[in-house]
Image (spheres, grey):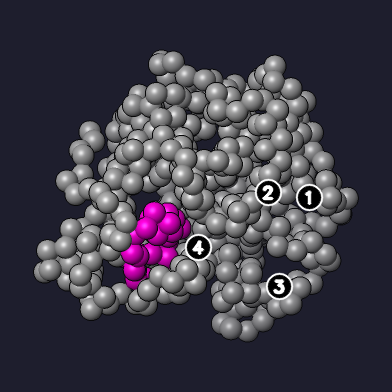
Amino acid sequence: MLETPKVLLKNLQDCKIHFIGIGGIGISGLAKYLKAQGAKISGSDIAISPSVKYLKALGVEINIPHDPQAINNQDVIIHSAIIKEDNTEIQRAKELEIPILSRKDALYSILKDKRVFSVCGAHGKSSITAMLSAICPAFGAIIGAHSKEFDSNVRESADMSLVFEADESDSSFLFSNPFCAIVPNTEPEHLEHYDHDLERFFFAYKYFLDHAQKRVIYKEDPFLKNYSKDAIVLEKKDIYNIQYILKDGEPYTSFELKDLGAFLVWGLGEHNATNASLAILSALDELDLEEIRNNLLNFKGIKKRFDILQKNALILIDDYAHHPTEIGATLKSARIYANLLNTQEKIIVIWQAHKYSRLMDNLEEFKKCFLEHCDRLIILPVYSASEVKRDIDLKAHFKHYNPTFIDRVRKKGDFLELLVNDNVVETIEKGFVIGFGAGDITYQLRGEM
């Protein structure tokens, strides 16, 4: 199932590498990591983004938009999964016979000599990766989100061990060379990549697990509960005495795990305790228990995951959740947080669906996921993520919520403005607002667009 890529990145020192689509969180992470290894990095993207700004500040030359003239004497080109064959820079690289690697092919070269703790699953993988990075501070890290602990999605280290957030959406997790495979769940997503073949989808997870020396799995998952090879297993009953507290104004979950005693982790919800437990179990052979317990306290959350932007008259939270399961779990956390703050404010949700394909594949679940803990629903236009627009009557499908439909939301000081046709139709000055989506809603809520 897995073919070894023909082109390998060998001596990274002074290797000239150009990234097409460098602003994406996954590609930007590889660019940062390889730059720290001594490679000479350049890149391009279609628009300025926070990742592009960050890389430019590091001295990386980046073209906006793509420009074939940027391709000249590079040793290798690496492109993100969404870049097509007709991209002008890809075509120029072919003319010059410069080797071209997809991101997943590049992973093989980057990770093949590392002792990789590879985290993959439909939900929770960014949090688990960041938690395990906090527990094991000597390890390198490549995360699909910014860890607030070290304000980046990459942590460079001379250690052979690396914590890596793997991606099942394009099967690139199969190229991550897992020493330890950590899987919290296998809920089907991104089935278009697997030709909507569930057998092929689950076989990929089995391959990923089978080829690791060590496995840590959450056995409440329907697929994982039937996994037959040796693994460190977490079950729901292993986590108990869950409590939620505010510590210095920050939300924390306290819980006990198996016979290992009590732990405290930033964030709220049963899913948060589950994620932390998987990270803890993955580290038991690496550090002594008290180090693990203390180091977990260094985890301060990750950007766009229950990201508390402000907490005054208007409590504003930004969350990356873009699947019904994630939205439901995070709404429970929002209710817990509201109760801890002792606020009587209603929970207002601003939702931006991400991709027409995901919306259509999970439409019935999306129609139900706001039923609990959402007092008012505000809906933004679908963020297409380069997909062709589809006709879908959101007003009809979500009429049971009596939702408000807007074109965009704008941060204005400590307030939020709701806009239709560039006209402000409402200003939210106080209350409890949480935004959901993997598109540009995060920039709207932060006043960055």
Three-letter code for the amino acid on which mark 4 is drawn: Gly
| Left or right: where 387 falls relative to 447 | left
Q: CA distance from mark 4 to mark 3?
A: 18 Å
| CB atoms of marks 1 and 3 within 8 Å | no
Q: Is residue 173 above or below residue 304?
A: above
> What amino acid type should be assigned to the residue bearing mark 1?
Glu
Give the secondary structure at mark 1: strand
Q: Residues within 10 Å of mark 4 (few under 14, many from 20)?
A: some
For label 1, count other residues whose C-alpha is less than 10 Å away and answer few (under 14), some (14-19) or many (20+): few
Callout count? 4
Q: Quadrant of residue 218?
A: top right
User: What amino acid type should be assigned to the residue bearing mark 2?
Assistant: Lys
Looking at marks 2 and 3 on the same chain, the residue that comes earlier in the sequence is marked by: 2
Q: Which residue is mark 1?
A: 250
Q: Are marks 4 and 3 in contact (CB under 8 Å)?
A: no
Which residues lie in the magenta part?
Answer: 19-45
Please give the label number shown on residue 300. Answer: 2
Q: Earlier in the sequence, mark 4 or mark 1?
A: 1
How far apart marks 4 and 2 lie (CA) works out to 23 Å
Q: Quadrant of the N terminus?
A: top left
Q: Is residue 161 above or below residue 301?
A: above
Of tags 4 and 2, the one toward the viewer is: 2
Give SS at disc 2. loop
On the question of residue 367 being in view, the answer is no
Could you give the CA–CA distance between mark 2 and mark 3, rounded to whole angstroms? Answer: 26 Å
In terms of sequence position, does the residue under pointer 1 or pointer 2 come before the other? 1
| Residue at the disc numbered 3 | 416
Eye-nearest disc, 4 or 1: 1
Residues tagged 1 and 2 counted as in contact (Cβ below 8 A): yes
In reply to whether residue 336 is colored magenta, the answer given is: no
Assess whether residue 39 is covered by the magenta stretch: yes
Residue matched to label 4: 439
